[in-house]
Amino acid sequence: MDLYAEKSKSWLQKGTITMAEFVLLLCAYWILFGEVGRTVEEWMNVSPVSPVPVRRYVIFGFSVIIFLRMTFMMFVLMHRRIPWSEAFTIPFAFALYYLGFAVLSLPSQSLLSAWDGGAIFIFLMGCYLNTASEISRHRFKRDPDNRNRLYTGGLFSLARHINFFGDILWVCAYAAITHSWWSSFIPLFTFSFFAFYNVPALDRHLAKRYGAVFEQYAARTKKLIPFVW
């Protein structure tokens, strides 16, 4: 089934995802700043510190930004159908981000460094690449003159799936700022999901819908990572 070809508001599914993400965000707050976090610290043999490390505020800030971006994308930019199976599985992925990164950041009590500043920059860059590319495509599609035309301009001239590349960047930055090597498995999972599932599925849809136009676009444009692949 080609989900990208099916258009639907999917209000109930989107509402379910948003509510689940909001609950996960609250849980992340309790881990980073509340009693739940102190319990987890005991399990991890981490000594509690006061005041709360700035790193935890950064991690939670990342989560809030991603929650707001995801909500905007679903209710404003996304027009394809969301099946209930997807509505129930998407929150599991965001549990890795909101809860996984929160837990993995607890042992790190060091001050923010230049490395962390670079991670924050990469996070913001990833958010920009994803959101700006999606908005520019949305505006292109809203123009009646562009009906049934493939959008290949703007950031999408750098890579066919530059929006997915943006997601990979902010997940990598999320992982880096936790200062935990275990966090590296999460961006690896994210990259694998995009590279081996989302990108091939979307390419098949675009090839079927746009034919030779997409083939020409694919021949001159990198798949996921600008100037590389």
Image (cartoon, grey):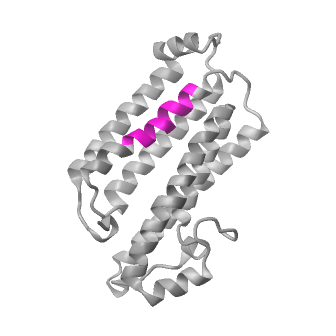
Q: Residue placed farthest to the left in the image?
A: 12
Closer to the camera in the image, 92 or 55: 92
- Residue 150 visible in rendering: yes
Q: Is residue 30 magenta?
A: no
Closer to the camera in the image, 130 or 205: 205
Q: Is residue 101 magenta?
A: yes
Q: Position of residue 63 (x, y in %)?
A: 50, 38
Q: Position of residue 195 (x, y in %)?
A: 54, 60
- Residue 130 visible in rendering: no
Which span is picked out in magenta?
A: 91-103
Q: Relative to 198, is 162 on the left or the right?
A: right
| Residue positioned 42% across, 66% down in the render | 201
| Residue positioned 26% across, 68% down in the render | 6
Above or below, 223 against 30 in this view is: below
| Residue positioned 51% across, 60% down in the render | 196
- Please tell me whether the stretch drawn in magenta is mainly helix, strand or loop: helix
Above or below, 150 against 132 in this view is: below
Q: Relative to 165, is 19 on the left or the right?
A: left
- Quadrant location, the C terminus: bottom right
